[in-house]
Every structure is written in C-alpha cells, then in structure tokens.
Image: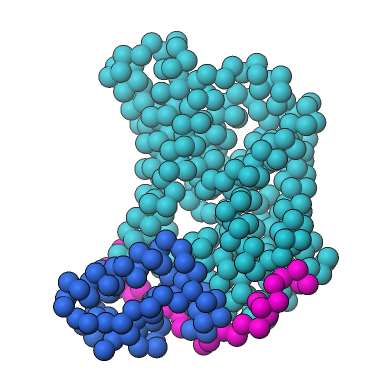
C-alpha cells in the first residue's frame, strides 16, 4: 500500500494538501495510508524547507505548494 | 499607459452610477474602481510574466547558493534573493532552520527574512504604476539597505543565544531539489499556478487597501494631513511606523494607501516608512517566528527595524522635499 506523508507545520495549505490526496485516492478507489508530519526535525530530515511537502513511500515528490490534482493522480497511480 | 483604467473609472463612476464628480463619494468610488482594476490587471500580468522566467527559484536553491559565502557577498545576496524568492510565510520556520543548518549566519538569515515580505517584484511594479518609478526605486533601495543593516545589527549583538536551542540540533536531510520546468507548457502551467496562488492569497489585502485608500482620498481633507503629517511634525514619521507595526498587509495591499497619502501631500519619507512597517513587521509573522526565536530576539529585531524605518522616513523627508 502506498504511504503518503504531508509535511508542514500545520498551516492551512498543508491540511488542504492532505485532504486533496485523500479525496483523490477515494475517487480512484485506491487504498492509501496518509499521515501529517508536523515535527520540524522530521520535516527537515526529509530535506524540505518549503511546506507543504509530500513524501511518497519515503521519497520527497513535492514541496513548496499545494500540488496539482494531476500530480496527485500520478502519485496514486504510480 | 494606464489611462484606460482612469477612463473605465470615469465611465463607471459618472455615467453608470451617475455620481456628481464634485462629491466626496464620487472621488472615493472613482479611486476604488480605478485602483482595483489597475492593480488586479497588473498582478495577473506581472506574476504570470515572472513565473514564466523564474520557474524554480526556491528557498532550497537560495540556501545552497548563499551557504559558505563571505559576508560581503552573502548579505546583498540574501536581501536580493529574499525580495524575489516566493515562499509562504508558514514556511518561515523551516526556512530559518534550514539556513542556519547550512551554516548561513543568523544575521544573513534574518536579512533574508526582513527583505522578503517588504519587497517583491510585483509590489515594485504596482508601486511604480501608482506613484512613479522614482519612488519605487527608492523603496527598493531603502528596503534592501534596511534588510542588510538589520541583519548586521543582529550579527553584531551576537544574538545567536536567543535562538531556541532545539534549532541548532536539527539536522537536515539531503535537500531534494525539485526539477525545474523544462517545456514551455510546464512553464506556462507553473506561471498560471503562481497567479492563482498569489492572487488567491493577497486579494483581500488589496481590496481592503484600495478601500482604505479610496476613503482617505475621497473623504479626508488635505488640510488634515498638512496639519498632522507634514515634514515639520517630528512625530509624524515615528507615529506612522508605530501604527504600521501591528498592522499587517501584503506589500501590494499598502500601495493604494501610499498613493492616497501622497496625493494628499504627505511627504514621501513618511509614506514609505509606513509602507515598510506595515509590510515587514506583523503580529502573525512574529507568532510564527516565535517557534524558533526567543522573545528577546523578537523584541530586539522589532526594535532595530523600528529605528531603521524611522531613519529611512527622516532621511527621505530631508533630501526629497
């Protein structure tokens, strides 16, 4: 199962990002795990400075903005 | 160049709404319509154009570029890149930690964070369109200088002791630099995404700013400003800066107020000091930075900027009136 982590200090954009991923996975009927990482040490551990960041199976795939629906779909299908 | 917005405002105020040009209400409505249309037009245009060329200027890249440089290079670089690198204020904390972790001095990091909200290319273009290039250039030069001076002061006072201890313990993972956009379509998508992102974030500041500017322009008589905000009143600049500290707006949102105040004859130094203070120092930003800075450092930082903005105000009032 795909594991998503949304990195961010708890700002609105980070919550939106997590919601978008969850909604897209439901829409595509794919089961995923998703967690929000708010601990600064853990976020920086991924090498991400601009939030929200997205980690897919422990690899950073995105940072600095709310991702587009298209890229979310690609991650879920990948 | 912007006459079309004046004509649009003429037409909608006098013909469509049928307001008498001599009234205060008409002046305010005219200002509002002209500025709202002009500013949003410029916002979309400038953000899109810059987005096309600057697809991937990210804080991660800035960190790599600035780390390990001598101070003579890193300070100017930090304020310059601070002005043009887009990042959401909720990223201030990871950005701050990331810079320090890369060995970038506290002063240089703070210089970046001071310049960043105060100057950005969109605000500069809108400011130039509203009050002329001369004022816009002065604002940029003053803003960059304040950023450097603020950073140097923090370095001189050796304020590292007022950074929260945990910050120094965080180790950053290998920075995953995002791939830049390569095809034209990717660039256009990125630029359009930036327009939506930035306009979506700041439209409310712009509307409120234009509303206040319109009210000042239409309803507050010039005599009021001549009496209280002339260059002779030594309290005008400090008061302007003090008023601006708790207030927060995006830099672009302050511009209609700048425009209205200047048209009422408020001296340029006073107006620019107000603009810097509103854009650079704000309560929400302090609360965010409190996660990494102890209260003493936040107070010192605010104090340094307070003095610097007042100095800018007096200096410009002295040499430009």
Residue beneath the point at 50% across and 69% down: A9
From what the image shows, is residue A28 above or below residue B306?
below
Q: Position of residue B142 (x, y in %)?
A: 68, 49
Residue beneath the point at 53% across and 39% down: B255
Whether the magenta-drawn stretch holds residue B174 is answered as yes
Residue beneath the point at 47% across and 43% down: B205
Q: Position of residue A51 (x, y in %)?
A: 46, 70
Region rendered in magenta: B160-188
Of the 4 image quadrants, the one containing the C terminus of chain B is top right
**In the rendered picture, chain B carries what hue?**
cyan
Q: Position of residue B270 (x, y in %)?
A: 69, 35
Of the 4 image quadrants, the one containing the N terminus of chain B is top left
Q: Position of residue B32 (x, y in %)?
A: 42, 29
Residue toward you, B208 or B44: B208
**Chain letter for the blue colouring in the rendering:** A
Q: Quadrant of residue B313?
A: top right
Q: Left or right of B35: which side holds B226?
A: right
């Amino acid at each position: 199962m795909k594991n998503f982590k949304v990195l961010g200090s708890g700002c609105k954009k980070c919550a939106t990002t997590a919601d978008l991923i969850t909604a897209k996975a439901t829409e595509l009927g794919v089961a995923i795990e998703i967690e929000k990482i708010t601990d600064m040490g853990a976020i920086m551990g991924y090498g991400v400075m601009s939030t929200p960041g997205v980690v897919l199976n422990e690899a950073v795939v995105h940072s600095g903005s709310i991702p587009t629906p298209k890229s979310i779909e690609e991650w879920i299908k990948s | 160049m912007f006459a079309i917005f004046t004509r649009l405002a003429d037409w909608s105020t006098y013909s469509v709404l049928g307001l008498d040009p001599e009234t205060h209400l008409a002046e305010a409505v005219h200002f509002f319509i002209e500025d709202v249309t002009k500013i949003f037009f410029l916002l979309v245009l400038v953000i899109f154009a810059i987005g096309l060329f600057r697809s991937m200027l990210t804080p991660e890249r800035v960190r790599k570029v600035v780390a390990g440089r001598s101070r003579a290079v890193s300070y100017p670089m930090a304020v310059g890149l601070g002005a043009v690198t887009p990042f959401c204020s909720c990223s201030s904390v990871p950005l701050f930690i990331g810079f320090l972790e890369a060995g970038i001095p506290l002063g240089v990091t703070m210089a970046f964070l001071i310049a960043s909200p105060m100057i950005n290319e969109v605000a500069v273009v809108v400011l130039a369109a509203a009050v002329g290039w001369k004022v816009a250039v002065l604002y940029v030069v003053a803003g960059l200088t304040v950023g450097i001076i603020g950073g140097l002061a923090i370095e001189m006072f050796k304020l590292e002791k007022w950074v929260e201890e945990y910050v120094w313990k965080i180790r950053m993972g290998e920075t995953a630099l995002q791939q830049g956009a390569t095809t034209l379509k990717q660039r256009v998508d990125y630029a359009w995404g930036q327009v939506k992102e930035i306009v979506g974030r700041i439209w409310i500041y712009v509307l409120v700013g234009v509303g206040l500017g319109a009210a000042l322009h239409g309803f507050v008589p010039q005599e009021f400003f001549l009496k209280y905000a002339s260059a002779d009143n030594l309290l005008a600049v400090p008061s302007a800066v003090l008023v601006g500290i708790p207030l927060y707006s995006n830099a672009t949102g302050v511009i209609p107020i700048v425009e209205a105040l200047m048209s009422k004859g408020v001296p340029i130094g006073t107006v620019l000091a107000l603009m810097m203070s509103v854009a650079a120092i704000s309560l929400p930003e302090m609360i965010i930075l409190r996660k990494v800075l102890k209260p003493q450092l936040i107070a010192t930082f605010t104090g340094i900027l307070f003095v610097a903005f007042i100095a800018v105000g007096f200096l410009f009032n002295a040499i430009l009136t």
